Image: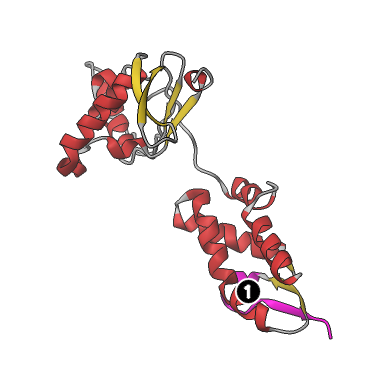
């Protein structure tokens, strides 16, 4: 309990519990969820149900004052609110003119708590966010690093799968990596699209290789990554 009371709680897709104008059907339930979140984030004592293993639930008292809450999400449409506000500010005064904010991106310099409130966040909850950070999308070079550098990268996982089950090497050419990154970039869903794209490329090989004799290496070329050709199989007799 002591460790948990000094932990980090990360809420992914936090924006989904905010009743935007495009999601008016869920206003009641979303407002209730925000209210429950506010109670925890304010720093208070909460009751936590606990299964003690004997079939009887017990309730533990937990202090949330020292817990770090991180609320992350895409917040689609928030940039329009920020740009509209900047246009309004730029048009005030006798000598001002309407400025074009269409190319301005959200940053720590221009986003404010009031924008989150206009987006649909309860004022009390928005006020509890001590710091607002803006993350930038991955460019192609960053995407390539995500794909190849971590020990548990998607490519490494598939390589281990081929090696463990069939003792086969799986290799991707540099051109194939570039094609994969280009595909994922066009999807505009970030690194989460890497697994789907690579699985589609390897789908036939995953099915065919176990039934083939003598295959020792599967090479994914640029054409194979583009689904224009089959992967190259290196066979040893």
Q: Residues within 10 Å of mark 1 (few under 14, many from 20)?
A: some
How is the structure coloured here?
secondary structure
The reply to whether residue 112 is visible in this rendering is no
Residue at the far front in the pictured view: 54
Was residue 6 drawn as part of the magenta stretch in this picture?
no
Nearer to the camera, 52 or 49: 52
- Quadrant of the rendered structure where residue 106 is? top left
Q: Quadrant of the C terminus?
A: bottom right
What span is in magenta?
Answer: 222-237
Which x, y percent locates residue 46? 34, 19
Q: Residue at x 51, y 61 (%)?
A: 196
- Quadrant of the rendered structure where residue 86 is? top left
Nearer to the camera, 228 or 45: 45
Nearer to the camera, 27 or 64: 64
Q: Residue at x 35, y 13 (%)?
A: 44
Which x, y percent locates residue 198? 57, 63
Which x, y percent locates residue 21? 18, 39
SS under mark 1: helix
Q: Is residue 40 above or below residue 151?
A: above
| Count of numbered circles in the view | 1
Q: Is residue 65 above or below residue 29?
A: above
The reply to whether residue 82 is visible in this rendering is yes
- Quadrant of the rendered structure where residue 209 is? bottom right
Which x, y percent locates residue 159? 70, 62
Side of 183 relative to 142 (left or right) = left
Name the residue tied to disc 1. Answer: 223
Q: Residue at x 66, y 78 (%)?
A: 210
């Amino acid at each position: 309990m002591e460790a948990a009371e000094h932990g980090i709680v990360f809420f992914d897709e936090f924006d989904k519990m905010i009743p935007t104008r495009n999601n008016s059907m869920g206003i009641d339930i979303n407002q209730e969820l925000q209210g429950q979140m506010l109670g925890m984030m304010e720093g208070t004592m909460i009751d936590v149900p606990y299964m003690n293993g004997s079939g009887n639930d017990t309730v533990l008292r937990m202090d949330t004052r020292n817990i770090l809450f991180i609320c992350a999400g895409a917040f689609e449409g928030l940039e329009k609110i920020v740009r509209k506000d900047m246009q309004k500010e730029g048009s005030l005064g006798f000598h001002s003119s309407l400025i074009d904010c269409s190319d301005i991106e959200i940053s720590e310099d221009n986003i404010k708590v009031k924008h989150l409130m206009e987006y649909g966040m309860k004022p009390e909850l928005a006020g509890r966010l001590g710091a607002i950070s803006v993350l930038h999308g991955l460019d192609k070079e960053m995407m390539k690093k995500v794909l190849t550098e971590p020990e548990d990268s998607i490519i490494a996982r598939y390589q281990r799968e081929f090696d463990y089950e069939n003792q086969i090497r799986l290799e991707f050419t540099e051109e194939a990596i570039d094609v994969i990154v280009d595909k994922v970039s066009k999807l505009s869903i970030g690194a989460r699209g890497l697994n789907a794209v690579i699985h589609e490329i390897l789908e036939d090989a995953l099915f065919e290789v176990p039934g083939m004799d003598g295959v020792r290496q599967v090479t994914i070329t640029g054409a194979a990554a583009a689904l224009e050709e089959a992967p190259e199989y290196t066979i040893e007799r």
